[in-house]
Image: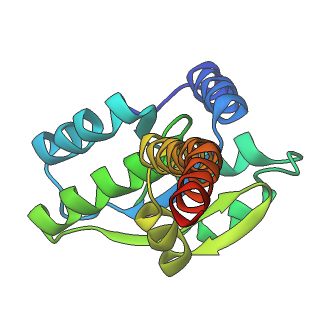
Amino acid sequence: MGRTLANKHEIVATLKQELSQATMVAVINYQGLTVAEITDLRRRIRPKGGLCTVTKNTLMGKAIAGDANWQALEPLLQGSSAFLLLKDDIGGSIKAYHEFQKATKKTELHGGVMEGKILSGADVKAIGDLPSKEQLMAQIAGALNSVTAKIAIGVKEVPASIARGVKAYAEKG
């Protein structure tokens, strides 16, 4: 039994709602995956703020119609598509997908869209290779700590060097 028109409108409305909250959408070919494997993928990306949804390309096409942010997704709507709607930790979600892909070797990343621009599969993978937000914050904190330590050592060194100079002058005379 097929979907009713009301059911299709409900799916499109839900997709529009999810897209409005997403920062990036990645498109994968899920052909050959079992229900258990799709569930595993969903479990892997959900903690990172991602959502995996499988829907017909025509319904996704209706959801992105007229939306400048997601219109670039149109060329990727081919074949058996699953959509990764990424919100919070984009890099972490992409890394979780790549770990899943290495384990199953059944999916293929077609590409994605971010800020209205289409990205190739290699571009999406490169985003996944970037350090996470936490790693970047740790690097910045380490750099700041290093600078403050050097300033403190420099400030402490000025009176110490004056004292050494005075002592050397006193011993000389």
**Left or right: residue 32 compared with residue 110:** left
Which of the pair 24/147 is nearer the observer? 147
Extreme residue toward the front, this view: 173
**Left or right: residue 68 compared with residue 42:** right
Query: Which corner quadrant holds the C terminus?
Result: bottom right
Query: Which corner quadrant holds the N terminus?
Result: top left
Q: How many numbered marks have been drawn onto this rendered protein structure?
A: 0
Image quarter of residue 99? bottom left
Which of the pair 27/93 is nearer the observer? 93
**Residue 52 screen position, x and y as percent:** 40, 40
**Residue 98 screen position, x and y as percent:** 28, 62
**Left or right: residue 121 compared with residue 159:** left
Tell me which residue sits at (77%, 54%) in the image. 115
**Residue 49 screen position, x and y as percent:** 45, 31
**Left or right: residue 61 compared with residue 53:** right
Tell me which residue sits at (53%, 47%) in the image. 153
Tell me which residue sits at (55%, 75%) in the image. 123
**Residue 116 screen position, x and y as percent:** 80, 58
Reply above or below: 134 against 157. Answer: above
Which of the pair 63/91 is nearer the observer? 91
Q: Name the image colouring.
A: rainbow
Tell me which residue sits at (71%, 40%) in the image. 63
Asked if one can make out residue 82 in the rendered structure from this viewpoint, the answer is: yes
